[in-house]
Image: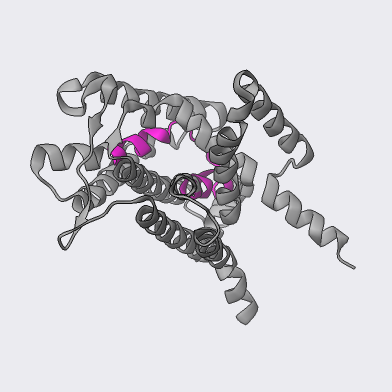
């Protein structure tokens, strides 16, 4: 029982230790801000990893939910004078409802058909955000009301570092508990074989819909957090490229690995910052490094390294 509990807590405890340790190591507010961006991306990636890595369902439109969450904390306070924190919760609720409604027909598809359907959904969300300028500000975006708690205005890279870090740890803890629950076992069963899972008594459609809704809520909360940190939001948060970035983070870090979600997010957020010194060769080097990683570590960084460590143990 103790070994099972330790295994369940390993990922969130490791993430919490990293968040705490980096706070004393990073030298300036710039690095704290970059770290906060990593925590936000990792939160969205954990939700997508539940869908892709554990349930085996592909989504190429998850940035749509991310963008809806981002615009929720921009539009609702501006148009309806709603507190940003309540707007965050409302955005998560709306995204969950949309995922429930859209997921029922979409998740009947498989493979490439599912990927194209989710891609189309994401593009529709991005087009709606960009075109409804009367509400969203259009392609130019719109400002986001600053978060205030009990009269205290939340500001500063250090403050947001801790807030987003706490959100990430909470998201990781919820994810590992979900994976260890009967629902998580059902998700892993349908990932291996939907036919076998159905024969074993798993309601495949039901569990697919559950994890799709959960992953949408994760993306929405992450999008709201990014909008609040930046104080501004643009349609880029919901576009197709961002969806591909989220999927790439899942694959790089390792599908089916909660800690791998953080690793994949860190690579894709930090590496472009590091490679800016190479100017014109930045994207070339980033692409080559990602190719090498996937060729050498085919299961993703964390699962591949874990398997290598197990093989080398005496």
Q: Which of 167/46 is in front?
A: 167
Relative image position of residue 130 (x, y in whole percent): 28, 21
Residue projecting furthest to the front: 27
Residue projecting furthest to the right: 314
Can residue 1 be seen by looking at this rendering?
no
Q: Quadrant of residue 111?
A: top right
Is 153 positioned to the left or the right of 254 in the image? Answer: left
Prevailing secondary structure class for the magenta stretch in the rendered image: helix
In the image, residue 226 above or below residue 189: above
Q: Which residues are magenta?
A: 46-70
Which residue sits at x=33%, y=51%?
156
In the image, residue 141 above or below residue 50: above
Relative image position of residue 189 (x, y in whole percent): 59, 54
Q: Quadrant of residue 121?
A: top left
Which residue sits at x=39%, y=55%?
158
Is 277 positioned to the left or the right of 81 in the image? Answer: right
Quick one: quadrant of the C terminus?
Answer: bottom right
Can residue 311 be seen by looking at this rendering?
yes
Which residue sits at x=37%, y=32%?
237
| Count of marks, rendered view | 0
Q: Quadrant of residue 306?
A: bottom right
Instruction: Tell me if residue 155 is in the magenta stretch.
Output: no
Residue projecting furthest to the bottom: 2
Relative image position of residue 160 (x, y in whole percent): 36, 53
Instruction: Tell me if residue 66 is in the magenta stretch.
Output: yes
What colour scheme has been applied to the protein in the rendered image? one colour
Quick one: quadrant of the N terminus?
Answer: bottom right
Q: Which of 247/55 is in front?
A: 247
Relative image position of residue 61 (x, y in whole percent): 43, 31
């Amino acid at each position: 029982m103790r070994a099972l509990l330790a295994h369940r807590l390993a990922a969130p405890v490791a993430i919490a230790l990293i968040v705490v340790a980096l706070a004393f190591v990073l030298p300036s507010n710039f690095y704290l801000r970059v770290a906060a961006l990593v925590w936000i991306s990792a939160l969205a990636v954990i939700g997508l990893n539940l869908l892709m890595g554990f349930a085996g369902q592909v989504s190429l439109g998850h940035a749509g939910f991310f963008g809806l969450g981002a615009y929720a904390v921009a539009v609702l306070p501006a148009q309806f004078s709603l507190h940003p924190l309540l707007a965050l919760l409302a955005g998560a609720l709306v995204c969950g409802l949309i995922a429930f409604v859209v997921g029922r027909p979409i998740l009947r598809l498989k493979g490439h058909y599912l990927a194209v359907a989710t891609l189309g959904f994401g593009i529709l969300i991005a087009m709606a955000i960009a075109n409804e300028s009367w509400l969203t500000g259009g392609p130019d975006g719109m400002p986001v009301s600053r978060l205030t708690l009990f009269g205290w205005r939340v500001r500063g890279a250090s403050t947001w570092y801790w807030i987003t870090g706490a959100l990430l740890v909470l998201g990781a803890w919820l994810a590992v508990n979900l994976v260890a629950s009967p629902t998580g076992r059902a998700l892993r069963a349908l990932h291996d074989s939907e036919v076998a899972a159905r024969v074993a008594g798993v309601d495949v459609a039901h569990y697919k819909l559950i994890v799709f809704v959960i992953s949408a809520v994760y993306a929405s909360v992450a999008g709201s957090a990014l909008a609040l940190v930046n104080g501004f939001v643009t349609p880029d948060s919901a576009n197709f490229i961002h969806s591909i970035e989220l999927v790439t983070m899942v694959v790089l870090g390792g599908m089916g690995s909660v800690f791998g979600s953080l690793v994949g997010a860190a690579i894709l957020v930090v590496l472009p910052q590091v490679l800016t010194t190479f100017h014109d060769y930045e994207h070339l080097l980033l692409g080559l490094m990602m190719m090498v990683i996937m060729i050498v570590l085919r299961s993703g960084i964390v699962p591949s390294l874990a398997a290598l460590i197990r093989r080398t143990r005496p």
